[in-house]
Image (tube, rainbow, N blue to C red):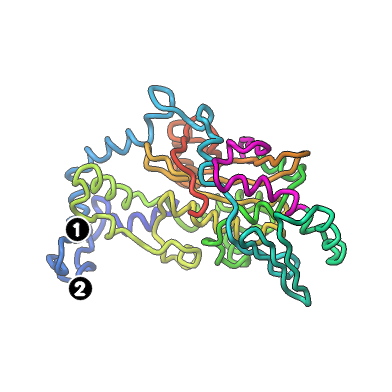
Amino acid sequence: MNWDSVRERLPLAGDEGSDDGGAADVAGGDPDATGGGTRVTRRRALTALGTVGFAGGAKALDNVVVGYGVLEGTNLLDQDLATVVGERLRPRRTWTSVRGHELVFADGVAFLEGDGVDESLDLATATRADARTLDDQLGFELFEPLVADHELLTAMVDENAADVDGVRFEFSTYEPFFERVREGNARPGAVARLRENRYTDVEPATVEAFADADPRDPKAVVDGLVPAFRGHTSYDIPRYAAGSVEDNVLLGSVDLRQHFESPTDFEALEDGRNSGMFCYEFVYRSVEALHSVPAYDQTTPVFGGRVHDERHKHAYTAIGSVLREGSELVIPMTFVDYTHSTLYDDLMLRGVMGRGLEAYNDRHRATDIYWNN
């Protein structure tokens, strides 16, 4: 854990200069400046944490311990998880690349352009024989799986995917998940249609350098992000404490979090400008990493999303894929939590708060899953 950054931003008792707490860094060096609005200095923020932190800490403890089905509530293993997953999961107007060609999905039509190719196919009206003929001309299998899967994917647009006949969800921890996808009839085209392009701007080389893993291998990326996050950042304890006081004690009347914010993109993680991450920021970076290469280029094509646990004010990463089995589309799913693997492992609290990276367990729950993050 990056304790140096924590110490720098939240001076501990006995630290040289901790009496001032860096207040002059806020509002142009004037420790009492308000900037024209209701503001507090960093020193006052730290004072607030110290004087009313107990109440906020008690509420925070309640948020992370209670409600997984032991005393009350439920968890991923007990929930009707397919319904939660399927509520927002649907194909989108999107684009990807296949062997150097650009593949665009729009209004049920697939367009393929590049390297002298300019083809389109209406996936709703074309037959699989039509698609195979086009694939033979192109020299690789592309359109036939898209036509075969289109009807079931389209049915997900107007109803929960869990209620679509011919669509089935499977849930497991992440090791069996990747083995299942690797050995199955994976459908990268369907995966591409279920992805959202909002988090696709990170270069594969950036991911490879950060995670020390080939981004074409999602399993390696999932594993590689654990030591990478630990080595470059930490869970933002000061910002969390400030937010806990802000939300649970001051009821949002003062913005304490602003004094502990830092950039959280991969570049900031690499060059040291980041000084801590929140749970949802770990999710964004992990989805970016998983989406940094097209589904067609991955050894196990995957799409990622953000799980929101309203009860515990927590977020973690959902990972899915699509397989074809006979007339069915099977959607394997797994869940990982980089907050747990970064914070709880480093604090040696796995037995109390979580079990490292694995999140498909009785210490996680899902209120909503957002596939566009």
Q: Position of residue 81 (x, y in %)?
A: 53, 34
Does residue 82 show up magenta in the picture?
Answer: no
Q: Position of residue 37 (x, y in %)?
A: 15, 64
Q: Main secondary structure of the magenta part?
A: helix
Q: How many marks overall?
A: 2
Please tell me whether residue 282 is drawn above or below residue 329 in the rendered image.
below
In depth, the one of 336 and 17 nearer the eye is 336
* Residue located beneath label 1 in the image: 43
The residue that appears at 24% across and 52% down in the rendered structure is 14
The residue that appears at 47% across and 52% down in the rendered structure is 282
Please tell me whether residue 48 is drawn above or below residue 296 in the rendered image.
above
Does residue 157 show up magenta in the picture?
Answer: yes
Look at label 1 and name its amino acid: Arg
Q: Position of residue 60 (x, y in %)?
A: 31, 38
Please report the bounds of the magenta region as a residue range. 145-174
Look at label 2 and name its amino acid: Gly
Q: In the image, which is nearer the foreground, mark 1 or mark 2?
A: 2
Specify which label sits upstream in the sequence, 1 or 2.
2
Q: Which mark is residue 28?
A: 2
From the viewer's perspective, tell me whether residue 323 is left or right of residue 173.
right
In this view, which residue lies farthest toward the top?
71
Please tell me whether residue 345 is drawn above or below residue 228 in the rendered image.
above
From the viewer's perspective, tell me whether residue 110 is left or right of residue 277.
right
Q: Which mark is residue 260?
A: none
In this view, which residue lies farthest toward the left?
32
Mark 1 and mark 2 residues within 8 Å of each other at the beta carbon = no
Quadrant housing residue 43: bottom left
The residue that appears at 53% across and 36% down in the rendered structure is 83
Crowd band around label 2 with a 10 angstrom C-alpha radius: few (<14), some (14–19), many (20+):
few
